[in-house]
Amino acid sequence: MRLGDLYTQIQQVNPRIAVARSLTQAALARVPGATRPPDPQVQLGFMNYMVPDLAPMATLGMRQLQVMQMLPLGGKLALSGRVAGAKAAAVGERAQDVSWELRSEAAMAFYDLYATDHRLAVMRETVRLLQDIEQTAAAMYRVGDGRQADVLRAQVEIARMVEDTVRMQAMRQSMAARLNALLDRPTESSVGQPALPVFPDALPSRASLDSLALGNRPMIRAGLEEVRAAEAAEQLARKEIWPDLQVGAQYAQRGGEMGGTERMGSLMFGASVPIFARSRQYRMRDEMGAMARMAQADVAQMRAETRGKIGEAYANLSRSRNLAQLYRNTVLPQAEATVASALAAYRVGNVDFMTLLDARMTVNTYRQELHTLDADQGKAWAELEMLTGRALIDSNRIAAATRGDK
């Protein structure tokens, strides 16, 4: 299972991606309507009709048609469009952030599964090696060169390792279920063995990661769009004190005194009067000003949080990378040489069984820790990708087998 293929499937089938896309489409659909004036009002009236026969009164009964249109002044419609457009852009950026969050969640499950699979492989190999050691101890005991306690201790270690293997298999099922949930598949669906991608040879600088995140992280870009929307809304609130113009036209007709039809027309103008400006329009300004300051503070908080998380992920990446190199180049070769020496010495009776067993278990512990360090390195890269909003590794290239995989 390649990490890149997993990313592609997440984008195609995860319901949260579909939800985010639908929210973006809904926000974009609201933008054109925000720049249009309110719908005109049409009224049809029948005036001066007699009751109960509903016949028009002579010379007074008339039918009239009236159309009224409210026209906001002072650039209110343009500002409303800016508010809606900025909010729609913020929703779109949040949809991108959801995508990066899901990539990160998928990567965490992927690397956990990778470490679990390789720890299981080491455990199974350890069981086989312990069985070989147990057979060696039993053969030495039969010829009088060993102790029965050594045979029993080997059997106990084999039983303990089998127990740990069963427990680790249950953990793998749990991790596979988590990955299947991200892929919107049944829990019991089969999940392949993750293939570790190739990590970059060199680490980017902290400064470059900070700069990249502050300019490219979708969450921060969404916050900046919210600031633009809040600033436009504050400007719009200051325009609310301006009266809105109302324009109307009226057409009426009635029966004339000589039996003909008399037709009449009227043109009307009006305006809203902000008589409650102190408690409404001025308070609206205060509200929008507070919202703008809140949006600015929110962006500052997101930037600070992003820098802090980048620092943590960078430290984890450096730690796991350096320790993995140390394990591969120094610790594991020395530990394996110790095992070979201890086994040869045990066969000739120069060391006791516990020395051999401890050396063997130490090697396998180091191998398990090495796979965990590889997984930690992958998690750190995934975290940095989410924080910067950019792919930093080639998720489709598979790393070659290393010492810890053998």
Image (cartoon, grey):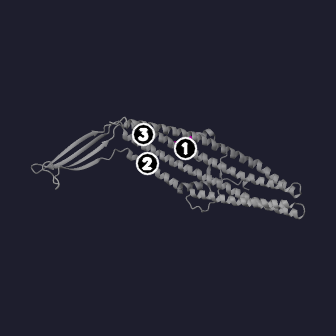
Q: How far apart in space, not on screen, are marks 2 and 1 (Cα)? A: 21 Å
In the image, is 125 to the left or to the right of 101? Answer: right
Figure quadrant of residue 76: top left
Does dot 3 land on a helix, a strand or a loop?
Answer: helix
Q: Which residue ends up furthest to the bottom in the rendered image?
A: 142
Q: Which residue ends up furthest to the left in the rendered image?
A: 258
| The one of 147 and 125 positioned closer to us in this rendering | 147
Q: How far apart in space, not on screen, are marks 3 and 2 (Cα)? A: 17 Å
Residue 225 rendering spot, x and y as whole percentages: 48, 42
Q: How far apart in space, not on screen, are marks 1 and 3 (Cα)? A: 24 Å
Q: Which mark is residue 233?
A: 3
In the image, is 312 to the left or to the right of 134? Answer: left
Marks 2,1: beta carbons within 8 A: no
Q: Amino acid at mark 3?
A: Ala
Give the residue pinned by disc 1: 217
- Residue 302 in sight from this viewpoint: yes
Label 3 vs 2, first from the N-terminus: 2
Closer mark to the observer between disc 1 and disc 3: 3
Q: Which mark is residue 58?
A: none
Whether the magenta-drawn stretch holds residue 212 is answered as yes
Q: Residue at the spot x=63%, y=40% of the render?
A: 206
Please provide the residue range marked out in magenta.
211-220
Residue 151 rendering spot, x and y as whole percentages: 83, 61
Q: Amino acid at mark 2?
A: Leu
| Viewport quadrant of the N terminus | bottom right
Q: Main secondary structure of the magenta part?
A: helix
Figure quadrant of residue 8: bottom right
Whether the magenta-drawn stretch holds residue 158 is answered as no
Residue 191 rendering spot, x and y as whole percentages: 62, 60
Marks 1,3: beta carbons within 8 A: no
Does dot 1 land on a helix, a strand or a loop?
Answer: loop
Give the residue pinned by disc 2: 28
